[in-house]
Amino acid sequence: MRVTVEGVETASQAAFLDTADGHQVQGVFFGRPVPTSELGASILAGFARAMPPASPMTKLHVDNATAER
C-alpha cells in the first residue's frame, strides 16, 4: 500500500517522513496551494528557476552536407 502524508509544514516533519519511508508527502513546506488558473504558470516558473542559465558558448551547429549522407 502506498501512503500520501498530507499537512507537512516543517523541515523536521519532512526529514522524519523521509526516514520513515513515507511514499509521498504534501503540504505547505513544499508549496502553498495554487488556483488551477495559475498552476501552469507556477510550474513553468519553477522549471525556469531550476534550469541553469544558458552559456553564451553553447551553440548548435548543423552541417547539412554531413546530415544528408
Image (tube, rainbow, N blue to C red):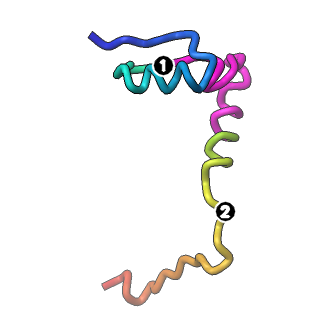
Q: Which one is nearer the viewer's eye here, 6 or 42? A: 6
Q: Quadrant of the N terminus?
A: top left
Three-letter code for the amino acid on which mark 1 is drawn? Val
Answer with left or right where residue 25 lies relative to residue 21.
right
- Between 52 and 18, which is closer to the camera in this rendering? 18
Quadrant where the image shows the C terminus: bottom left
On residue 25, which mark appears?
A: 1
Residue shown at 38% from the left, 19% from the top:
22
- Quarter of the image for residue 66 reads bottom left
- Give the foreground label among 2 and 1: 1
Residue 5, image x and y in percent? 46, 12
Residue 51, quarter of the rendered image: bottom right
- The stretch of residues the image draws in magenta is 25-44
Q: Between residue 8 and residue 63, name the one nearer to us.
A: 8
Q: Residue furthest left?
A: 1
SS class, disc 2 = loop
Precedes in sequence: disc 2 or disc 1 = 1
Q: Does residue 41 show up magenta in the picture?
A: yes
Left or right: 50 in relation to 17: right
Say the numbered circle drawn on residue 53. Answer: 2
The extreme bottom residue here reads 65
In the rendered image, residue 2, in percent from the top left (x then y), is placed at: 31, 13
Estimate the spatial distance between the alpha carbons at disc 2 and disc 1, rounded to whole Å: 30 Å
Q: Position of residue 19 (x, y in %)?
A: 38, 25
Q: Going by the image, does 3 lie left or right of 44? A: left
- Check whether the beta carbons of the residues at disc 2 and disc 1 lie within 8 A of each other: no
Identity, as a three-letter code, of the amino acid under mark 2: Pro
Residue 5 inside the magenta-drawn segment: no
